[in-house]
Every structure is written in structure tokens, then in C-alpha cells.
């Protein structure tokens, strides 16, 4: 962890009177706050905070450090403000879902790098929602509901969950006429999205859950797409994953009227407080670029 971050966390602990309060103030996890305080005390070889049953209080060493740390952080903020007009440089770590990241976030990263030649980016593609703080990530593109209400998010649109099949499969097996008929069809299920073999539909203003017995279960979406295009069965996918196949006729969309509610697409950071200019520039760039994508429906 950056040593200025350690000092900022230390001051937040004193100002809030607790580790949990400092975590909420800085949008940091409780373990991250505890590790930062422990690392600072180990480096200085002295206890900085006395832990009582009701709150935390600084030791004499903690009071001396707090006075110096406040001056240092104020000087640092002033220096950063003076340098705000300087060219952006440094490293950003960005994460996104695998397929969406390859197809749509990578071009956003490339155009950002073209605009800011002194910047570097590490793009981490993973279908798990990686924790920004624990994984040391700066920004994420997330599809679906946001589990952490503490995150700062900018919504760029939404995608749909679609039932699709190839023309060859439908010619051989016919198109299912009702939810009950799904049991008689071959189903390709993506276990990377949900563990339980079931699909949710929206019918008559109510959610309907259909439990499945998949003919083929795959934990990776690209393999699902290959199988459905090969005529192996019906699959539930996200609209951006099959936009080109639907346009070319390689796949057909079934039951659009029964599709569940759309999934939001967000650009997410852990905190808007003291956001670095390089990060703010990336968020603004990504929101604008992703909002123009035809595979993302705009917000209504």
C-alpha cells in the first residue's frame, strides 16, 4: 500500500474514532484499514492507537504523527492541485467481464492510451466481480446489479438476457411453444453465470422459474456460443454476446416478450473522494465510449 494512503487511513481512524468508521469514510474494507494501521505501527516500532471498549484514541506517538501527517497530506493535496494541468501519466488497473472486456472494453482502453501517451493500463478480464480494494484495482465495468452499495457507479445502459438457437436446430426440433416445452428440448447451460440449472422468464407480469435438465453444461461463454451455433440446443445469453450472430442470421432470438428485466451496465470505482485526474479521465472516457455502443441499450 502507498505510504500516503497509510497516513490518510491513520488520520481517518482518529477523526472517526473507529476502524469501521475509517473504512466507511474512505470506502475501504475493514481488513484493509486494519492492515494499514498494523503496517504503520510496525514500520515505526510503536503503538499509535489505544483500543478501548468504546473507541480508539491516539497515543502520544500517535498524536505527534497525526500532527505531522495532517501537514504532509495538506502539502500533498496542494502539490497535486498545482500539477493537475500536467500530462496524465502512471498506471491504471481496470477489470471487466471476459467477453465484454475483449470485445468492447479493450477498444476503450486502446483509445484512452492513444489520447494519453504517458499512461499505462493493466486490463484484468474475469467473469467474477473482483473486489476493487482487495485486488488493488482502480475501476471496473460491471454487468448486473451492484452487490456493494458503497461503490460509486455511473450507469451507461443495459443489456438483455436472450433465449437463442440456430436455424438448423429449430428446423430439426421445432421452436418451443411454451415454457413447459423446454423440458423436451436440448438445453446448453452456462454454469459460469449461475450454478443452479434454471432460467427465469417474465410472463403475465410475474417471474416464472423454469428448472432445467441440460444436455450440455459449460462453464465458459465462448464454448456455449460455439455449441449453440453448431445446433446443439437452446441457450440463454446476453444480448451483446450474440449481436453479430443475430444480425447475420447465424442465431435466432426466441420469446423476446418473455425476457426478464434488463441488466444494468456500470462503470464503477471504489470512491469518488480524491479521485486522481488519470482515473477521472478514464471514467469519463469509458462512460462516453460505452454509452455509444449499439450492443448496450441506453437508459430509458
Image (cartoon, helix red, strand yellow):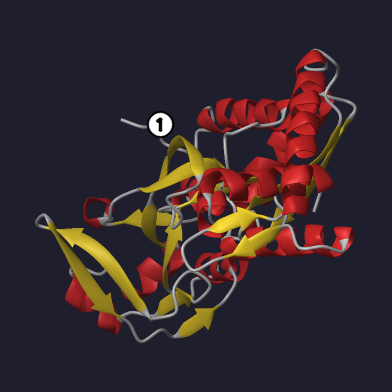
Percent from the top left, x then y, of residue 126? 65, 61
Count residues near mark 1 (Cα–Cα under 10 Å), then give few for <14, some for 14-19, many for 20+: some
Extreme-left residue of the structure: 204
Q: Looking at the image, which is closer to me, 219 or 299?
A: 299
Residue 300 vs residue 284, the one in the foreground: 284
State the residue position of label 1.
Answer: 298
Side of 38 where 223 appears, left or right? left
Single out the residue that lies furthest toward the front.
60
Q: Is residue 140 left or right of residue 233?
A: right
Residue 208 higher or lower than 151, as above or below: below
Task: Please state which of residues 227 and 293 is positioned toward the viewer in this rendering.
Answer: 293
How many numbered discs?
1
Kindly indicate the quadrant of the structure image that contains residue 199.
bottom left
Residue at 51% x, 59% y is: 55
Q: Secondary structure at mark 1?
A: loop
Q: Residue at x 66, y 63 (%)?
A: 34
Q: Is residue 27 above or below residue 44?
A: above
Q: Residue 104, can we see it?
A: yes
Residue at horizontal 85%, vertical 16%? Answer: 86
**Where does residue 160 sit, x and y in percent of width and height?**
38, 50
The spot of residue 17 in percent (x, y) is 53, 51
Q: Residue at x 70, y 55 (%)?
A: 59
What x and y, as percent, mark residue 63? 72, 46
The quadrant where residue 289 appears: top right
Kindly tell me whether residue 128 is visible in this rendering.
no
Q: Is residue 97 above or below residue 87?
A: below
Is 222 placed left or right of 173 in the picture?
Answer: right
In this view of the protein, which residue sits in the foreground, 281 or 158? 281
Q: Quadrant of the C terminus?
A: top left
Amino acid at each position: 500500500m502507498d505510504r500516503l494512503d497509510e497516513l490518510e487511513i491513520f488520520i481517518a481512524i482518529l477523526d472517526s474514532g473507529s476502524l469501521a468508521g475509517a473504512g466507511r469514510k474512505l470506502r475501504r474494507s475493514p481488513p484493509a484499514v486494519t492492515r494499514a494501521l498494523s503496517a504503520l505501527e510496525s514500520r515505526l516500532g510503536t503503538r499509535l492507537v489505544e483500543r478501548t471498549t468504546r473507541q480508539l484514541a491516539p497515543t502520544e506517538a500517535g498524536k505527534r504523527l497525526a500532527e505531522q501527517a495532517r501537514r504532509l497530506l495538506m502539502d500533498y493535496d496542494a502539490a497535486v492541485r498545482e500539477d493537475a494541468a500536467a500530462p496524465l501519466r502512471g498506471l491504471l488497473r481496470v477489470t471487466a467481464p471476459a467477453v465484454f472486456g475483449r470485445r468492447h472494453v479493450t477498444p476503450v482502453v486502446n483509445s484512452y492510451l492513444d489520447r494519453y501517451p504517458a499512461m499505462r493500463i493493466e486490463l484484468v478480464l474475469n467473469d467474477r466481480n473482483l473486489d476493487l480494494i482487495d485486488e488493488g484495482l482502480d475501476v471496473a465495468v460491471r454487468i448486473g446489479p451492484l452487490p456493494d452499495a458503497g461503490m460509486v457507479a455511473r450507469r451507461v445502459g443495459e443489456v438483455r438476457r436472450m433465449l437463442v438457437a440456430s436455424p438448423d436446430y429449430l428446423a430439426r426440433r421445432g421452436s418451443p411453444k411454451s415454457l413447459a416445452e423446454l423440458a423436451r428440448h436440448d438445453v446448453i447451460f452456462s454454469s459460469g453465470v449461475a450454478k443452479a440449472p434454471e432460467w427465469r422468464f417474465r410472463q403475465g407480469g410475474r417471474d416464472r422459474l423454469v428448472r432445467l435438465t441440460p444436455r450440455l453444461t459449460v462453464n465458459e461463454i465462448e464454448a456455449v456460443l460455439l455449441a449453440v451455433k453448431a445446433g446443439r440446443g437452446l441457450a440463454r445469453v446476453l444480448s451483446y454476446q450474440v449481436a453479430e450472430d443475430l444480425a447475420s442470421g447465424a442465431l435466432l432470438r426466441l420469446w423476446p416478450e418473455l425476457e426478464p428485466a434488463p441488466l444494468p451496465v456500470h462503470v464503477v470505482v471504489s470512491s469518488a473522494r480524491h479521485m486522481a485526474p488519470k482515473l477521472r479521465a478514464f471514467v469519463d472516457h469509458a462512460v462516453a465510449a460505452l454509452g455509444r455502443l449499439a450492443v448496450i441499450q441506453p437508459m430509458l
